[in-house]
Image (cartoon, helix red, strand yellow):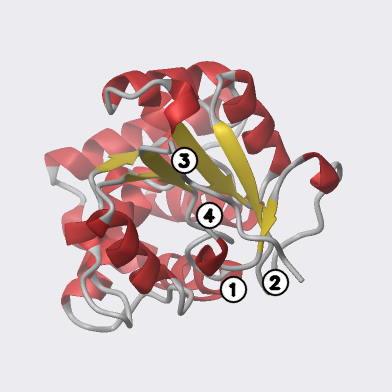
Amino acid sequence: MTTPISIDGIRGILLDIEGTTTPIAFVHDVLFSYARTHVRDFLAKHLDDDAVQTDIRLLRDEAESEGFHANNLDELVAYINRLIDLDRKSTGLKLLQGKIWHEGYTDGTLRAQVFADVAPAFERWRAANKNVSIFSSGSVLAQKLLFAHTEAGDLTPFINDYFDTSMGKKGEAESYRRIAEAIKLQPNEILFVSDIVAELAAAREAGMKTALSIRPGNQPQASRDDYPIIHSFDEL
């Protein structure tokens, strides 16, 4: 029987998305697939948009640094698909994916999945005046879109802040210190929940409390016994 983790004294709850609020399968099988299927048409349609051009420059710089060419549409699409296959935490890729997903969410093609315990937990934490924030490798736009278009409804009213890798890498303690400063809380007042122990280790180094999310489809984690474990937000 799992023992609930007390959040007395916790003023902020910082959450990963993939494997924590949302099934990994949704991200990899639905969102990544959607981006791959629509990237060529999206680029052809929005090639002259300034924001898209910024993403393309980032992607071309990244490709060049790796010895790849992404000078024309075919090469660019091939490189983007390569990054998707690698699940690369690429800034250019994440920004572009967010824009592609925006069209899917807006026309109703995409509807985000969250675990059944997520919406009730968000309501419970908001009622208890907890700061609820998100830290994901996906862009802030992608995060907001996901939580605004879930099968449980629009959950964005329950979320105070969103952070992506512009704050730093998820495996580095300094990223979590920056987040604590941004939400104006001491690190030891924040609980970070993730399915990746390397991220939990970085958050713990920064002084945060941590919990390992074990959900259906999550990858087994080494050193999992070093962290409190939850299978549902009902345990918080």
Residue that appears at 77% across and 71% down: 1
| Tags 1 and 2 touching, CB below 8 Å | yes
Question: Quick check: 120 above or below 165?
Answer: below
| Tags 2 and 4 touching, CB below 8 Å | no
Circle number at residue 78:
4
| Tags 3 and 4 touching, CB below 8 Å | yes
Mark 2 is surrounded, within 10 Å at the Cα level, by few (under 14), some (14 to 19) or many (20 or more) other residues, namely few
Question: Quick check: 137 above or below 150?
Answer: above
Circle number at residue 70:
3
Circle number at residue 94:
none
Q: CA gap, disc 1 to disc 2?
A: 7 Å
* Closer to the camera in the image, 158 or 143: 158
Marks 1 and 2, the one that precedes in the sequence? 1
Residue that appears at 68% across and 74% down: 216
* Closer to the camera in the image, 72 or 97: 97
| x and y percentages locating residue 78 in the rendered image | 53, 54
Q: Report the number of discs.
A: 4
Tag nearer the camera, 3 or 1 = 1
